Image (cartoon, helix red, strand yellow):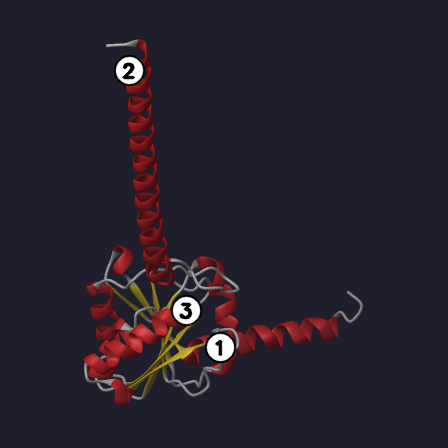
Amino acid sequence: MSQHELVLDTGQGSGAVSEGRRRRSRLGLVVTGVVGGSLVALYAVAAPFVAPALRRVCLPFVPATTAQVENVLRVLRTRTGTLVDIGSGDGRIVIAAAKCGFQASGLELNPWLVWYSRYKAWREGVYRSTSFHISDLWKASFAQYSNVVIFGVPQMMDQLEVKLANELPSSAKVVACRFPFPTWVPESTEGEGIDTVWVYDAKTFRSDLHRKTGKTLLEQKSHPHS
């Protein structure tokens, strides 16, 4: 082979290698784009279900277990009327309560979960006896509810005690799941471990609040400059 042919052959080989590299680079970009786009789409769909909505206190969406749902329904088996689930998530408590005869509502800040809950209620055939609202619990009124279910976190329970005691009728019952209220005395409990639910009578905690409030007012009158 002549020197000219050798140089030509070498140049063609380099061109082939360069072309191969370019193809691999383009393929890498395509794969990266597909994977990245898939991850973004997955996050867009999944994030609302696993990330906390914007609240005064962070409440991540953790679905109620089957045992928790059963325990809630068990302690409310003799009750009727309206029910609200605070932080209703995917709607399973509300839907289960509606099947037991309650006119049940769910309050949830996450719109994706609210829409999903409405779809589930329609699919389960209880859409007429359920309602789901995109609502901040601190801005909602609970005066119209006779039964309240809450899956809260410890950081919010003391504030919620005061709000519910001020707003609920004396005939109401409150069911706390996972965490009890800090100062209220439950009238009964059901289940064990993370599936435990605590039942509170509004008559009791309302009278406790009025007693404490009255005592505070008397102390302020007795010590006006303290």
162 displayed left or right of 218? left
The secondary element bearing badge 1 is classed as helix
Q: Callout 2: 10 Å neighbours few (<14), some, many (20+)? A: few
Dot 1 surroundings within 10 Å: few (below 14), some, or many (20 or more)? Answer: many
Spot the residue most to the right. 225
- Disc 2 to disc 3, C-alpha distance: 71 Å
In the image, what residue occupies the spot 49% across and 79% down? 140
Q: Where, quadrant-wise, is the N terminus in this rendering?
A: top left
What's the residue at 24%, 65% (across, down)? 68
Q: Position of residue 42 (x, y in %)?
A: 32, 56
Q: Which one is in front in this view, the residue at disc 2 or the one at disc 1?
A: 2
Residue 106 seen from this side: yes
Q: Is residue 55 above or below residue 137?
A: above
**Residue highlighted by disc 1:** 165
Which image quadrant for residue 116? Answer: bottom left
| Looking at the image, residue 146 lies above or below residue 198 | below
Residue holding disc 2: 5
Asked whether the viewer can see residue 88, the reply is: no
Quarter of the image for residue 218 reads: bottom right
Residue placed under numbered mark 3 in the picture: 110
Residue under the point 44% across and 64% down = 53
